[in-house]
Image: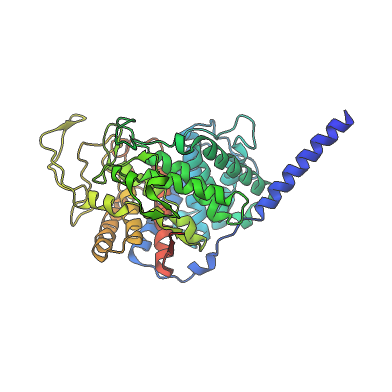
């Protein structure tokens, strides 16, 4: 019995040692470079939107979630392990963490001292990591969409890394390792979700794999950027590229010999997930919200934050999708969706306005703007075409302004009036995530140029 107990203790000690060693692989972010950086119009606007989400998260949202009575040194109870119990918490954690570390956070605006905001942000991170199945029996993780929640949690933890206690750092590392391993095991080439197979046949009617591949890739992206010397780095990076490329491939790409990251494009692909014209079908219709999803989850921001070259493959078909938004004409006619007669046709993005045309309607509500603003923000980084950059930058400002105007209706900074504007159960936290991405990208654009590589 004594020998058995000693063996257990040895294994636990070795496991703890391995996790401690892996936390040393973390490359922290150089926040100093953002001090006194130019506050460009899009950066200023994304910052205002993000600050509003901070205000809402630390006041109304915190109370609604039942966190107000929990001491800061205790774990928060999320009351479940499913999407709307974990994803929104992680989204707010990363939004707060980025605001605090990038110098955006303003206590005089939110009404909450910076020290309190930091304590609450760390409490969110500690609680999320501890509640993961790698650290708590029966916890969340290793399931549909959980790599995305782990990505959000990791982003928050990475931002606050030097302020986290060693136990939390180890629990974050355990979560990362578990979720990355789950993706590697369950999302190999034969298991990657595709809308069409390599022969061009629709094998997942009405249901693209674009956003699913992107969220599975997301944890790998932040892990690779955060830990460039990690023993699994090469394996993680290979799968990150595989999922990202498959997320945005079109039918013609399955025969392409163009080289991406050392291989012909066709050799990366299991099939395709977008249409030849750049549109995406999800929920059984052409869905503009899902045309933006792979870009919102794109790992570019993590590599850029870490000061690392960004794989050229991350830009695959980005110009094509922009053209589908900006120049592709749709004809709605007199179609009726959800009891409403659709407005006149045309392009999804309307010249001179931040309005969005949904060709066949939408099931989330027609008041979403932040995903489109972030999409245009990213396109302005990806494109080498001056006209595309100019158009994307203009639409970004107009679409973000509409989101900001919606927030200005409410004293606590939230965005939506009711479910008619956005029916997604975690729509407010979704805005926080989008605003965070937009603010990171605009802040990076203000001080540096991205470096892309095809190695």
Indicate the position of residue 192 as horizontal and vertical percent values: 43, 37
Tell me where residue 47 sits by quadrant: bottom left
Q: Residue furthest right?
A: 2
Figure quadrant of the N terminus: top right
Left or right: where does residue 394 sit relative to residue 308?
Answer: left
Residue drawn at x 21%, y 30% is 338
- Tally the numbered discs: 0
Does residue 213 sit above or below 96 in this rendering? Answer: above
Residue 140: horizontal and vertical position, in percent?
56, 34
Where 422 sits versus 315, above or below?
Answer: above
Q: Position of residue 84 (x, y in %)?
A: 46, 34
Residue 78 visible in the current orientation: yes
Q: Seen in the image, is 133 located left or right of residue 107?
A: right
Seen at 29% across and 59% down, the residue is 397
User: Could you tell me which residue is drawn at 45 percent across and 35 percent down?
Assistant: 190
Looking at this view, name the residue that lies furthest to the left: 334
């Amino acid at each position: 019995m004594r020998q058995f107990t000693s063996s257990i203790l040895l294994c636990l000690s070795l496991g703890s040692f391995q996790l401690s060693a892996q936390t040393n692989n973390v490359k922290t972010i150089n926040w100093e470079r953002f001090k006194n950086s130019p506050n460009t119009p899009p950066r200023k606007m994304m910052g205002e939107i993000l600050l509003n989400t901070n205000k809402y998260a630390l006041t109304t949202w915190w109370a609604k979630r039942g966190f107000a009575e929990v001491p800061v040194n205790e774990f928060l109870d999320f009351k479940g392990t499913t999407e709307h119990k974990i994803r929104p918490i992680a989204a707010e954690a990363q939004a707060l963490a980025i605001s605090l570390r990038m110098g955006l956070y303003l206590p005089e605006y939110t009404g909450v001292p910076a020290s309190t905001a930091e304590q609450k942000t760390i409490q969110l991170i500690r609680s999320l990591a501890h509640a993961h199945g790698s650290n708590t029996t029966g916890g969340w993780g290793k399931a549909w969409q959980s790599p995305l929640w782990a990505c959000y949690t990791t982003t928050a933890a990475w931002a606050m890394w030097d302020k986290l206690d060693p136990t939390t750092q180890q629990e974050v590392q355990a979560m990362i390792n578990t979720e990355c391993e789950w993706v590697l095991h369950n999302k190999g080439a034969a298991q990657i979700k595709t809308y069409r197979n390599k022969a061009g046949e629709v094998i997942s009617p009405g249901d693209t794999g674009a956003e699913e591949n992107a969220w599975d890739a997301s944890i790998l992206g932040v892990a690779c950027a955060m830990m460039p010397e990690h023993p699994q780095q090469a394996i993680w990076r290979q799968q990150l590229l595989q999922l990202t490329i498959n997320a945005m491939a079109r039918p013609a790409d399955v025969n392409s010999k163009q080289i991406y990251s050392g291989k012909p494009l066709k050799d990366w692909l299991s099939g395709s997930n977008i249409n030849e014209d750049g549109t995406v079908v999800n929920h059984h219709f052409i869905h503009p919200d899902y045309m933006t999803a792979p870009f919102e989850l794109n790992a570019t921001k993590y590599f850029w934050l870490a000061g690392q070259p960004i794989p050229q493959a991350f830009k695959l078909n980005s110009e094509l999708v922009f053209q589908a938004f900006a120049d592709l004409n749709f004809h709605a006619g007199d179609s009726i969706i959800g009891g409403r007669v659709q407005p006149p046709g045309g392009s999804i993005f309307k010249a001179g306005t931040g309005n969005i045309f949904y060709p066949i309607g939408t099931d989330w509500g027609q008041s979403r703007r932040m995903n489109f603003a972030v999409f245009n923000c990213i396109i302005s980084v990806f494109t080498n075409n001056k006209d595309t950059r100019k158009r994307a930058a203009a639409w970004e400002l107009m679409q973000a302004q509409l989101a900001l105007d919606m927030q200005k209706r409410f004293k606590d900074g939230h965005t939506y009036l009711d479910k008619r504007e956005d029916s997604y159960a975690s729509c407010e936290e979704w805005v926080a995530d989008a605003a965070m991405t937009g603010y990171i990208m605009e802040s990076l654009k203000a001080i540096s140029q991205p470096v892309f590589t095809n190695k």
